[in-house]
Amino acid sequence: MNSEPRGALGFATPARAFRAMLGGDAAALLEVYGIEDVPVGELDLTPGLIARARAERGDAPLS
């Protein structure tokens, strides 16, 4: 989950705001779906991200 603080969220990250609203339920939901915080410095929004993620999971490349 994008960990960039947002002014619209009181300069909290989306994940932090979600957890603040729903507490333990939010944490459980994020864990079930495998959603985790990604530090801003580690964000990769390039097209190659999909290919790398699929390779890491052992999925076949998209054609």
Image (cartoon, rainbow, N blue to C red):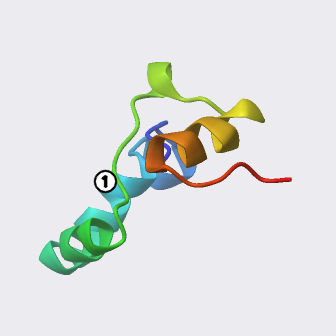
- Where is residue 23? Give x, y as percent: 17, 72
Check the image and report above or below for 58 versus 23. Answer: above
Q: Is mark 1 on a helix, strand or loop?
A: helix
The residue positioned farthest toward the left in the image shown: 24
- Where is residue 43? Give x, y as percent: 54, 29
Q: Which residue: 72% across, 32% down?
A: 48
Q: Label 1 belongs to which residue?
A: 16
Q: What residue type is labelled 1?
A: Arg
User: Based on the displayed image, in which of its 4 quarters is residue 12 positioned?
Assistant: top left
Badge 1 crowding class, 10 Å Cα cut-off, few under 14, some 14 to 19, many 20 or more, is some
User: Based on the displayed image, in which of its 4 quarters is residue 20 positioned?
Assistant: bottom left
- Where is residue 56? Give x, y as percent: 47, 41
Check the image and report above or below for 16 versus 19. Answer: above
Q: Please tell me which residue lies in front, 10 or 45.
A: 45
Position of 18 with respect to 6 (left or right) is: left
Q: How many marks?
A: 1
Determine if residue 46 is in view: no
Check the image and report above or below for 20 versus 8. Answer: below
